[in-house]
Amino acid sequence: MAVAKTVVRLPLLLLVAVAGACRAPETRPDVVVIVLDAVRADHLSAYGYGRLTTPVIDRLAADGVLYQHAISAGTWTVPGHASLLTGRVPSSHGAYRAPGGMNAATALDPSVETLAERLSAAGYDTAAFLANRAYLDPAFGLARGFRVYETKDLYPAAQLFRRVTHWLGQESKRPVFLFLNVLDAHEPYAAPPPYDRLFPGRLEHVGDVNREYLKTGRLPAPEVLTHCISQYDGELRYMDDQIGRLLGELEQRGRYDGALIVLTADHGELFGEHGVLGHGTLPWDALVRVPLIVKYPHRVRRGTVAQPVSLVDVAPTILAVLGLPPLRETQGAPLWERSGPVLAEELGPDGGGTRALYDDAGHVLFAQGDGDSRQLALYDLGTDPGEEQPLPAEGVGARLDTELSSFLARLPRAPRGPIATRSPKVQERLRALGYVQ
């Protein structure tokens, strides 16, 4: 995989001057982070998808930097969002699976510092509007540092952006840190009219495919998978139109050009690859490779970056642009300083599980289990993008295995928080999303 970059960089002294100018309260940039729940990068037209699913996001990418190989640190909502807000991988921040079933999860430990806490202390008005009411409930500890943290009546996306627009116009103070979760591409796949007929493949009278899959473990027929993809793509186009409302509002208020805007996803989605429908499984590339587009203030950086980057780099990037110190014990770095392997994890209740380590040459090493029972598999994404033909683990695999062991040995570990999914309220919300039968 080539690692050429076409990013236009300003001289370092000019960037420092811009950051210094942003420290005055009246000129500091607004920060907007938009998380598209369960959105894989290769279904966005900005990433070369054959269907025009995201024309608004495509224009946002033209104003900023598109990171072609951005990797989420987790495979599902809780660890993915926690990594975004802490700059830590899941085994360091402690919010991942817990005893009590596949849907049980622990909260972020209070000792782990969050981006919202840091920005609140720096004078930002912090607000989160989150459509995923289940796994982003305040019980998971991600509300710390937000003055406003809302999860009610924010689905579908039109309601979410209506509420955000009102908050920006009537309730917010400047500057703002606005953190959004948009749920519409999440299962079940059912695009609203007329988006449900926008792309070919739709079938009539298809039931709840996801619930049936979770119940039986059997993939639906190929034509049903094609239907699911048509609806997923329609949901993306619907979300894209709603995102256009927010960006238009920022432009109308004169707050777009100077804003730092990050658009990404907490994880992707599988449509039959590796025998899976959905997410929250092993960190396959189609599941952890997510969109990442950053519009820097006044477009000081534009272009594309081909080398792998991590979503744990997002919080360090925001703080660096604002001229603020990094979070404590972060594993991320500003995106323009990212070097070395990138890690994704799917952890079990005991902290063990499967890790995927990416290098700059297009290789990914799977390490499953711990200790003497650990199993390794190496893939070359350049020749085997579907990760179907593992290579011998000698050579490149041994090097990556050594790097992974070194990384894990020096990783700071946070205590596990309480099991947030024991709450009856959270259980009911998980049931509404189809996670609990």
Image (cartoon, rainbow, N blue to C red):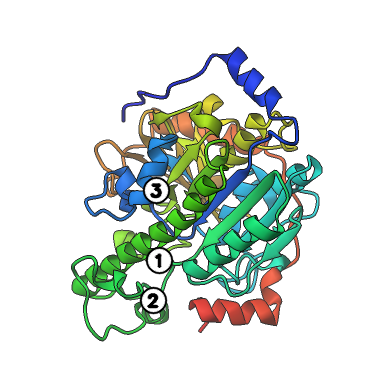
Mark 1 — residue?
278
Q: Classify mark 1: helix, strand or loop.
A: strand
Q: Can you tell which quarter of the image residue 395 is in?
A: top left
Q: Classify mark 2: helix, strand or loop.
A: helix
Residue at 45% in and 31% down: 398
Give x and y (percent) for residue 220.
27, 75
Tell me if residue 344 can be seen: no
Q: Can you tell which quarter of the image residue 163 is in?
A: bottom right
Amino acid under disc 3: Ile
Q: Where residue 210 is drawn, which disc sits there? A: 2
The answer to whether 49 appears left or right of 101 in the picture is left
Mark 1 in CB contact with mark 3 (< 8 angstroms): no
Mark 3 — residue?
57
Q: Give the vertical position of 83 relative to 234 (above or below).
A: above
Residue at 70% in and 54% down: 172
Mark 1 in CB contact with mark 2 (< 8 angstroms): yes
Q: Nearer the viewer, residue 308 or 247?
A: 247
Tell me if residue 384 can be seen: yes
